[in-house]
Amino acid sequence: MNNLVIDMTHGGVKIAISLAKKGRNVLAYDIYNTLNVIDRKMLEVYDVWLLDDLSELAKYRGEMRIIYPVHLPLTHEEITRNNPDLKYSFITHHAIVRELLEDWGDDIKKIEITGVKGKTSSVFMLKEILIDENPLILSSLGALLYEDEKEIVLKRDISITPANIKETIDLAYKIANPICKIADGIVESENLRKYNSAIFESSLGASGIGDVGLLTNISENYPIAKDRMTASEAKKQIFSCPTVVCNKESLDEYYSDVTHPKINTFSISDEDANLYCESVSYSLDRTEITVRYKDVKTVNDKILNGTMTVETFAPGRHHVLNVLGVILTSLALEIDEDKIIKGLANFNGITGRTTKRSNGNFTIIEEINPGINTDAIKQSVEMIDNLDGWYVAIGGDYGITCEEIDENKVAEYLESLECEIILTGDVGSSIADRMTKEITLIKDYTEVYDLALKNDKNLLFIYRSDYRKVSQR
């Protein structure tokens, strides 16, 4: 059977080569024409045949398995019409990664995380909880390995496509099994591993290798694949995990038709959820959350009930929602309550996401995320009890994620606020064009900090950007 891997931009090279190493007959199609010289040479080395166009399918016979990303801007019909006589089957990049990793990780805790908001924060809260188990991590902040609580950067510039789950595992293997040490007899086994747990963030679903799959939320159901699909449809792949933790409101709205033996739900206020808040005491520094959980289904078929109080960095409602998902995921994995409480107490936010810092008598809260949208802006502003003495600064860059910001909705919301507003960057400029209210427009985002300090203002800075870019400030 031939295997055609479509889309070299979002991990297709890794998938194609991994299949070729297993002795499969592999074809590849670079739909976006982004293949670089090195990757092209690698495909040649592993005898992966690169198609110039899908019309070349006409010369093949027999079975053809199409391996494609869930957001592919082509329908199955558009692919098969190039040769209707082939016997086609279709499998997503997520599903093929599960196939490639079928013999991996049976003896460790594994978590996959998807959702519209809160994925990265959830990853690093779980990292704190599992820190004693040397977690291996793929997140939007990089491929990372923790050993004795020390961070090892495997690769910083890496996307959260499914193929990079395999890439992260391969990078960790190379760290544990350097060829030079194996050759010199220093490493006795070629299967050493430095991690005892793994946490993988994915933008549009899950492969199903996670013992628990966490769906943080569907806070905005944005279109993908040239409007042929929505985010909720792609993220439905989370239900391929044997145990699922899901925001109850998202489950009720988008997945009421899903049949699955182990779904655990969380909610801030819905007492029908498996885990919900009994009380929340918000603070910009440490928020105290008491939760009640009932009939929680675990990976080992136990049923858990009880209450728990945690303190952690969660200044807004959306942060608390992330905490609830993390607690429920930990319970589903049968992690001890004391370990959950300790881990969350050690979480202090993520540089480049939500952070709070002081500069003299001034407070600066930063909400920096590639997926900032109107709902996220509202929730960030609601963290501040009284906006007197605050600047609210909003801005950012375009073309970062599949999800684009609705400038009209943001402008309408900002018109309703009674506070001083600063807009910055390309996103800020576009929003400013839609507003009648007096605002301050600053092209260079670094000048926002200077203005706040000069005018004795606290600053809530909400910026839509790639973490790697903003972290250079």
Image (tube, grey):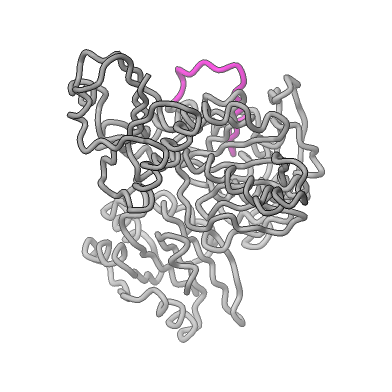
Tell me where residue 283 appears, x and y as whole percent: 64, 59
- Examine the image and state in which quarter residue 247 appears: top right
Please name the predominant secondary structure of the magenta segment in the image.
Answer: loop
Tell me where residue 68 appears, x and y as whole percent: 35, 31
Q: How many marks?
A: 0
- Image height check: is 88 above or below 357? above
Q: State which quarter of the image contains the N terminus.
A: top left
User: Was residue 259 drawn as part of the magenta stretch in this picture?
Assistant: yes
**Which residue is farthest bottom?**
454
User: Does residue 272 appear in the picture of this structure?
Assistant: no
User: Which residue shows up at 33% across the image and 52% down it?
Assistant: 36
Please name whichever residue, 324 or 276, is drawn nearer the observer in this view of the structure: 324
Please name whichever residue, 351 or 462, is drawn nearer the observer in this view of the structure: 351
- Image height check: is 36 above or below 436? above
Q: Is residue 266 left or right of residue 34?
A: right
User: Which residue shows up at 27% across the image and 62% down it?
Assistant: 431
Q: Which residues are magenta?
A: 255-271
User: Which residue shows up at 59% across the image and 79% down it?
Assistant: 359
Tell me where residue 147 appears, x and y as whole percent: 73, 53
Please name whichever residue, 105 or 255, is drawn nearer the observer in this view of the structure: 105
